[in-house]
């Protein structure tokens, strides 16, 4: 029997150290803070599970959680089908392939706070290109600083603009990996384009789609910077997503205990939904 | 005159004595910290290592020792019986020992949170439920 070289394990050590410092130690600290009260100066008083109970029963948390699920649901419902459609309509070879790819990649290169500021200025009714056009040329009242509906449309469109490309690029990579023989066989059998999509392209894209859905779920569920710079959670509380509310509690009110309890509940939700997505989408492969 | 002197001296003396007694009875200790008896519950929840920024307590430390201990046990089991004891359980999922531990812990978190939100303290019932759920995970899932 061949003995395996175990030396490769040492190459994992740097990652382990990194994960310890950017994930493990912070999460341990958050668990510690979630059961204590502090007024600063490293003085802590035991609070038990009061913060958890308070958060679980607070209307403010329920409202933010509802908005968060609405936002993530909208994002997934729009970006995944749109990404697939764009990937299917991109050319497979020739001059336009790199042009399309670079154009697609551009929004993802822009820093998140810049995206928020861009869309903020873009949609302002008096000076923004889109805002001015809608309000003064078309006569549609559209002001994301006044109307919750306009604010919601703006954050959803902004996220679609920013992140659909990720889905497109992943799907395109999946499509490119399909050998021509599959298409030739489909042509010989006289398969419709829907059948080609349903039985050749979609199954071949399944792995990358799993990754795309998981990434888009986690990113949109934990989104902070873009809506914060765009609407700041307003008008009122209408776009206060979970992370914005969390930062308000932790840094605005300096309630570290309740904020820690809330972030653990937040983490548990992200973990469960990601696990369900992953299990459902990979179930076919293991059967 | 001598009688008067004696009376005055004893009056002053008794004043001091009364003040001393009052001091002893507690007025002198008003501003001082009470000497606390360190009960088991206090020790369990008071800050460890004199209050550092990570704010460890014995209770939270135990949680992590339990989780990491469980992972170490899994690693040991993997060395002794390789292959992760893979099987298809009642949920029609193919799970290994690690998956079953993950499900037990995640399920326990949700059982505790649900109980805390719906009924509040004490948490003996969700503890029993979580142990039952964990046993179910390792036995059937």
Image (cartoon, rainbow, N blue to C red):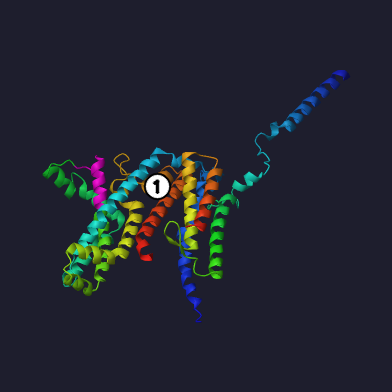
Total marks placed: 1
Q: Nearer the viewer, residue B58 or B84?
A: B84
How crowded pointer 1 is (Cα within 10 Å; few <14, some 14-19, many 20+) is rated as: some
Q: Is residue A148 magenta?
A: yes
Residue at the farthest right position? B2
The quadrant of the image that shows the C terminus of chain A is: bottom left
Magenta span: A142-158
Q: Is residue A107 magenta?
A: no
Q: Label 1 marks which chain's residue? A: A
Residue A149 makes an appearance in the image: yes
Residue B54: where, in percent of width, then height? Answer: 53, 53
Locate residue A21 relative to residue B51 in the image: left or right: left
Q: Residue at x 53, y 61 (%)?
A: B71
User: Looking at this view, is A130 or B3 the one in front?
Assistant: A130
Res. A90 image quadrant: bottom left
Would you name the residue on which mark 1 appears?
Answer: A247
Magenta stretch mostly in which secondary structure?
Answer: helix
């Amino acid at each position: 029997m061949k003995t395996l070289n175990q030396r490769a394990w040492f190459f994992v050590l740097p990652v382990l150290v990194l994960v310890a410092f950017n994930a493990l130690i912070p999460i341990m600290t958050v668990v510690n803070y979630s059961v204590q009260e502090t007024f600063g100066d490293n003085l802590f008083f035991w609070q038990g599970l009061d913060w958890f109970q308070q958060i679980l029963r607070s209307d403010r948390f329920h409202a933010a959680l509802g908005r968060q699920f609405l936002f993530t649901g909208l994002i997934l419902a729009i970006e995944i089908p749109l990404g697939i459609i764009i990937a299917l309509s991109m050319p497979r070879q020739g001059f336009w392939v790199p042009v399309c790819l670079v154009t697609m990649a551009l929004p993802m290169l822009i820093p998140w706070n810049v995206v928020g500021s861009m869309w903020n200025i873009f949609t302002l009714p008096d000076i923004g290109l889109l805002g001015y056009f809608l309000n003064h040329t078309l006569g549609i009242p559209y002001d994301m600083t006044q109307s919750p509906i306009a604010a919601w449309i703006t954050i959803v469109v902004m996220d679609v603009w920013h992140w659909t490309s990720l889905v497109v690029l992943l799907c395109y990579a999946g499509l490119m990996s399909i050998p021509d023989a599959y298409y030739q066989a489909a042509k010989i059998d006289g398969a419709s384009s829907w059948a080609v999509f349903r039985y050749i392209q979609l199954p071949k894209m399944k792995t990358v789609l799993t990754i795309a859905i998981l990434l888009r779920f986690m990113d949109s569920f934990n989104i902070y910077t873009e809506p914060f710079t765009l609407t700041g959670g307003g008008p009122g509380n209408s776009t206060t997503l979970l992370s914005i509310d969390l930062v308000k509690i932790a840094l605005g009110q300096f309630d570290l205990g309740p904020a820690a309890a809330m972030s653990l509940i937040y983490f548990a939700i992200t973990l469960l939904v990601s696990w369900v997505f992953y299990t459902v989408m990979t179930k076919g492969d293991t059967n | 005159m001598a009688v008067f002197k004696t009376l005055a001296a004893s009056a002053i003396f008794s004043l001091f004595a009364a003040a001393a007694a009052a001091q002893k009875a507690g007025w002198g200790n008003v501003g001082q910290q009470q000497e606390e008896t360190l009960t088991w519950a206090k020790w369990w929840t008071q800050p460890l290592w004199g209050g550092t920024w990570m704010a460890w307590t014995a209770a939270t430390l135990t949680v992590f020792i339990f989780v990491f201990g469980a992972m170490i046990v899994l690693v040991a089991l993997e060395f002794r019986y390789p292959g992760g004891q893979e099987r298809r359980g009642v949920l029609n999922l193919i799970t290994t020992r690690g998956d079953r531990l993950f499900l037990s812990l995640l399920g326990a978190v949700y059982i505790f949170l649900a109980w805390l939100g719906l009924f509040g303290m004490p948490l003996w019932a969700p503890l029993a439920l979580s142990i039952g759920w964990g046993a179910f995970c390792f036995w059937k899932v």
